[in-house]
Image (cartoon, grey):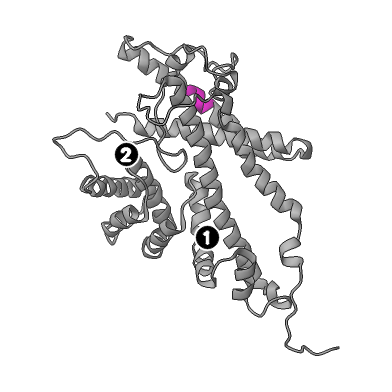
């Protein structure tokens, strides 16, 4: 057997392995663009116009921000997938035949420093668990904070902290930055209740009390500021009255289909209560919507997704539908978070 000369030879395998896998991932992200309004349907506006957005423009803006938010989330999710892959490459030392070190392999493969990737690998398990439980893809800076929470209080508290701060910050018109997470984390007591419900309640109380004291929070003597339109998934979405949009004849069929207005079988095209309807009528609408969402939640099981994804001839259609479910669910959740609290 020939001895190892110490010379490391590079090969093209690193960059050229299984190109169809990379292509399918890129295609999945590019398919998000199908949710954008048709460019021809977007009214071109002059440079100096400062008029309010029409209802049609608000709908187009909401759709566009939902797609942008989903694309941003896909980018954040890709980081954690990369981290998990590099964890395996490090464990198996698969770079040993082509590179002098793991750092050299990482630098060539993804163009990042070994130190940065080391942090990603460290935080990836918590990040993926956060995605699984909350449906939101965290950023690396956020995981630096919740990783400390995990070390002090355990996994459940770390994930709950992220979810609670996300919801409370959105309710107040803010964002779930690492700084906001850190402020709330620093106010957590040394010992928290062991029961999950009591634990969550305690964290939520601390988050509300802490964030209410932040300079950006509305004071007791002034109205809360109107938040700017935000991205779906990570941030809030501009609210929209669909009944007003339905009255606009120039809204494209493509847009109406994406908002489920053209689906006569879904029940979503039924007119909502008018502005002068009683609160009871509006409450009944919410109750009916909740019942419909509960039925949808029961029907969209993990097995349904698995069976739908199993057909190789329907991969594109499956992914298109899945992405639209994610986008629509994010929009519903964001509007509920922005709603007044009792």
Tell me the crowding category of disc 2: few under 14, some 14 to 19, or many 20 or more residues within 10 angstroms, Cα based. many
- Tell which of 35 and 122 is nearer to you: 35
- Tell which of 115 and 34 is nearer to you: 34
Q: Is the magenta stretch mostly helix, strand or loop?
A: helix
State the image quarter where residue 238 is shown.
Answer: top left
- Tell which of 118 and 186 is nearer to you: 118
- Tell which of 318 and 12 is nearer to you: 12
Residue at x-position 35% and y-position 40%:
170
Query: Residue 68: where, in percent of width, then height?
Result: 51, 40
3D distance between C-alphas at marks 2 and 1: 28 Å
Q: Which of marks 2 and 1 is nearer the N terminus?
A: 1
Q: Residue 307's mark?
A: none
Q: Can residue 301 be seen in this view?
A: no
Residue, disc 2: 173
Residue 99 position (above or below residue 183) = below
Label 1 element class: helix
Residue at x-position 76% and y-position 66%:
13
Label 2 element class: loop
Query: Residue 61: where, in percent of width, then height?
Result: 46, 30
Q: Is residue 144 left or right of residue 220?
A: right
Q: In which quarter of the image is the C terminus?
A: top left
Magenta region, residue range:
291-295
Q: Is residue 326 visible?
A: yes
Residue at x-position 55% and y-position 23%:
41
Residue, disc 1: 124
Residue 154 position (above or below residue 282) = below
Query: Residue 123: where, in percent of width, then height?
Result: 49, 62
Residue 153 position (above or below residue 326) = below
Q: Are discs 2 and 1 less than 8 Å apart at CB?
A: no
């Amino acid at each position: 057997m020939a001895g190892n000369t110490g010379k490391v030879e590079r090969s093209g395998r690193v960059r050229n392995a299984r190109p169809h896998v990379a292509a399918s991932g890129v295609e999945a992200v590019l398919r998000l663009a199908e949710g954008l309004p048709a460019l021809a349907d977007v009214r071109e506006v002059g440079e100096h116009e400062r008029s309010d957005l029409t209802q049609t423009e608000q709908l187009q803006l909401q759709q566009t921000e939902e797609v942008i938010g989903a694309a941003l989330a896909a980018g954040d999710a890709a980081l954690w997938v990369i981290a998990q892959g590099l964890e395996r490459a490090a464990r198996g030392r698969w770079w040993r035949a082509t590179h002098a070190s793991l750092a050299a392999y990482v630098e060539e493969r993804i163009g990042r420093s070994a130190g940065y990737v080391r942090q990603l690998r460290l935080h990836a398990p918590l990040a993926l668990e956060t995605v699984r439980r909350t449906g939101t893809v965290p950023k690396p800076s956020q995981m630096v904070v919740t990783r400390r929470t995990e070390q002090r209080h355990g996994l459940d508290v770390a994930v709950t902290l992220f979810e609670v701060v996300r919801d409370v910050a959105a309710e107040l018109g803010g964002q779930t930055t690492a700084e906001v997470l850190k402020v709330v984390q620093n106010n957590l007591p040394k010992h928290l209740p062991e029961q999950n419900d009591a634990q969550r309640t305690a964290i939520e109380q601390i988050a509300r009390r802490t964030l209410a004291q932040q300079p950006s929070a509305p004071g007791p003597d002034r109205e809360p500021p109107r938040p700017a339109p935000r991205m779906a998934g990570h941030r809030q979405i501009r609210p929209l009255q669909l009944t007003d949009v339905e009255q606009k004849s120039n809204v494209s069929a493509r847009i109406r289909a994406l908002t489920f207005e053209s689906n006569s079988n879904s029940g979503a095209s039924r007119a909502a209560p008018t502005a002068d309807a009683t609160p009871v009528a509006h409450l009944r609408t919410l109750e009916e919507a909740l019942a419909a969402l509960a039925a949808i939640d029961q029907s969209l099981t993990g097995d349904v997704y698995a069976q739908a994804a199993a057909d190789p001839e329907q991969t594109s259609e499956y992914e298109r539908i899945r992405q639209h479910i994610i986008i629509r669910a994010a929009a519903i959740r964001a509007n509920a978070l922005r709603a007044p609290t009792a």
